[in-house]
Every structure is written in structure tokens, then in C-alpha cells.
Image (cartoon, helix red, strand yellow):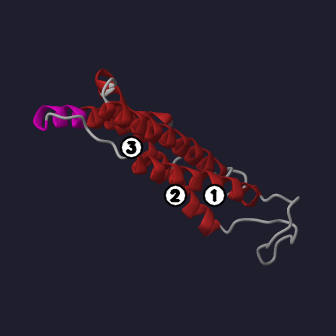
Amino acid sequence: MKPTRWVPLTILLAVGLAIGWIAVDMVERFAGRVLVVPSLAALGLWILALGILIWALVSRSALAGDRRRPGAALPGTDPGLRRMPPLVAARTAALALAASRTGALIGGVYLGIALALTPVLGTSNGSASFGASVAGLLACAVLVGAAVWLESMCRIDEDESQ
């Protein structure tokens, strides 16, 4: 598995931006109203982002094999060395990979919605939807940042793998 690069995340952000912009445009054209963005969706994204961030903070010492914090060691290893089992580390890396890509795509959708709603900020529905989309965009930014950080902690150095 290759580490996450910024180019695919940027492409996903651009695709999401186009989807969000088109969604706002289609709702305005065919329904004649402003697209309503629920605030609970942003809350759900914040919960997901904080979950990934907490998992990264909790896993940091186990992924680094920190000797300062005693814990459960693997059989046949130094008891002062607290390591994450390899299968859990691989699943954590896969979770981080999926979270970074999902956050980039959904963040792009929220960015597209926010940009498309700027002309109707004077209305109550427009400002509420704009606020919810900005909250979702910020949650996605935290999600992508935490996921990329968590994935970087799961990497194995070339010297360690042999």
C-alpha cells in the first residue's frame, strides 16, 4: 500500500466541489429554492473527525513502541515495549487511507455548496445552509489532517521491515 499523496486528495476535492456546485444549481433551477444543508450532517462529520484524531493520539505511542509508557507487550518481546499488533496497525492504516479520501471528497462537496451559496447569503435559508456547509468543510479538513497523520504513523521504515 502506497502512502497518501496530496494529488489524489486534491483531485477528489475538485470532483466533490463540482458535485456540490451542480447540486446547488440543479435545486435552484428545478425546485426554485435554496439547497438546504442539514446541520446534523456536519455534526456527524465532526464526530468522525474527532474519533480519528483520538485514535491517532491514543495509538501514537503504541505505533512508535514507546518505552516510557509500560503496557502489554507482545510475547517474546521486551515487556517495557508497548507495540501495536501488526494486523491492527494495518487495519488502522486502511482506516486512515479511507478516511482521508472520504474527507477530501465530502469536503469538496461542502466547499462547492458554500461557494455556490454565496450569492444568496442574505436569505435566512441561504445563510443557514452556508453555515452548515462551512462547518462540514472544517470537519472534513480536520478529518483529512488527522487521517493523513495517523497513516504516516503506521508506516514501516525500510530498515524495520527486514
User: Which circle marks residue 95 in the picture?
Assistant: 2
Q: Residues within 10 Å of mark 1 (few under 14, many from 20)?
A: some
Q: Is residue 85 above or below residue 132?
A: below
Q: CA separation, marks 1 and 2?
A: 11 Å
Residue 160 appears in which quarter of the rendering?
bottom right
Q: Foreground residue, 6 or 130?
A: 130
Q: Foreground residue, 14 or 64?
A: 14
- Amino acid type of disc 1? Trp
Instruction: Give left or right: position of 148 versus 70.
Output: left
Q: Residue at x 29, y 25 (%)?
A: 120
Is label 1 in contact with label 3 (beta carbons under 8 Å)?
no
Residue 69 appears in which quarter of the rendering?
bottom right
Instruction: Give left or right: position of 95 versus 16.
Output: right
| Dot 2 or dot 3, earlier in sequence | 2
- Amino acid type of disc 2? Leu
Q: Residue at x 82, y 70 (%)?
A: 71
- Amino acid type of disc 3? Ile
Q: Residue at x 51, y 58 (%)?
A: 95
Q: Is residue 124 above or below residue 154?
A: above
User: Which circle marks residue 55 in the picture?
Assistant: 1
Is label 1 in contact with label 2 (beta carbons under 8 Å)?
yes
| Dot 1 or dot 2, earlier in sequence | 1
Marks 1, 2: nearer the viewer = 1
Q: Dot 1: what SS?
A: helix
Q: Residues within 10 Å of mark 3 (few under 14, many from 20)?
A: many
Q: Foreground residue, 4 or 23?
A: 23
In the rendered structure, which segment of residues is drawn in magenta? 22-31
User: Which circle marks residue 106 in the picture?
Assistant: 3
Q: CA separation, marks 2 and 3?
A: 16 Å
Q: Is residue 97 above or below residue 32?
A: below
